Image (tube, rainbow, N blue to C red):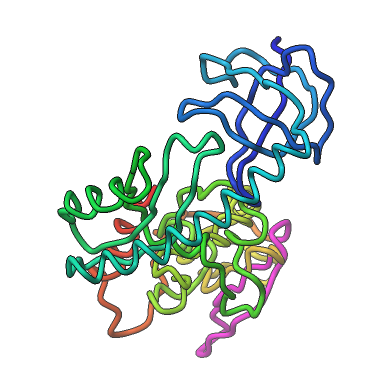
Amino acid sequence: MQEIVGVKFKKLGKIYFFNPNGLKLEKGQFVIVETARGIEYGEVAVGNSAVTEEKIVAPLKDVLRVATEEDTKTFKENDAKAQEAFNTCLEKIKKHGLDMSLIDVEYTFDNTKLLFYFTADGRIDFRDLVKDLAAIYKTRIELRQIGVRDEVKMLGGYGMCGRELCCCNHLTDLNPVSIKMAKEQGLSLNPTKISGVCGRLMCCLKHEQEVYEEKLSRLPTVGSLVKTPEGTGTVEEVEVLKEIVKVKLQKEDTFLKKSFKTDEIEVLKAGKKRDKHEPGIDMKELKKLEEGFKMDD
């Protein structure tokens, strides 16, 4: 086991492990740490804890000190300078006629690097832009092209549910989401109904997936031949969360649809899974939605 503290550098940023270096730290404290890109100012998200070696990405960097008032002042000054650099960069992008959207600008705590985050449809030749910015700020300039999901996470917004986007409210990591999740949750495979503000599959599809997987492992699929208290029939619909199965039964010359609890039926022959989607949906477009999501991971 290894003692660590978890530190984040943005409100909903990823949590990174550091060696507490003999310090006793609590959640909410601010610290100065050594990172791969230099000295940084961060917030303790996980106090002193012990984790297994497998969870640590070597080498484990040190916490240098608890942040002082002077450190906090420097951090705020860097934020103000970054905003000025943002406006300057916008002017330079326009000057060079570059087809790119500037999203955010960030100084490292020790001012050894100035980072510009942008989105673009393809590759951008920004060499002249970097030269202009380096001449103004006399420090190392780095431009980073980010995906649309990261863009939305930085800018913020609200989903079709009316709530703040998951990535802006509580998600620290943008986990993979697949079309399979939408299928298993019985959602219409309509891109406009299962994609978020970013144009990728909605992150909230991931939230209930574990519950659906557990319940589906015990439920018959649509099309299965089942034995019920009222006779043999075919499964027409499955309400996964309620664990109710709707079965089509034949009574003389008519067909009836009745609902049964899973413990009331016995599967005689499993049916093939069928995708639920609306007529006219372009499945190639749907696949691109998933592929585009993976490109941002």
Q: Quadrant of residue 51?
A: top right
Instruction: Find the magenta span and give its range.
Output: 244-264
Q: Quadrant of residue 259?
A: bottom right
Q: Outermost residue, bottom direction?
A: 254
Task: Evaluate whether residue 295 shows in this view.
Answer: no
Q: Quadrant of residue 49?
A: top right
* Prevailing secondary structure class for the magenta stretch in the rendered image: strand
Q: Please, is residue 36 above or below residue 108 in the view?
A: above
**Residue at the image position 37 percent from the left and 82 percent from the top:** 278
Q: Nearer the viewer, residue 102 or 193?
A: 102
- Check if residue 260 falls in the magenta segment: yes
Residue 182 in the image: state x and y as whole percent: 48, 63
Q: Looking at the figure, which quarter contains the N terminus?
A: top right
**Residue at the image position 52 percent from the left and 66 percent from the top:** 155
The number of numbered badges drawn on the structure is 0
**Residue at the image position 59 percent from the left and 82 percent from the top:** 257
Residue 74 in the image: state x and y as whole percent: 64, 43
- Check if residue 155 falls in the magenta segment: no
Residue 199 in the image: state x and y as whole percent: 39, 70
Residue 231 in the image: state x and y as whole percent: 62, 69
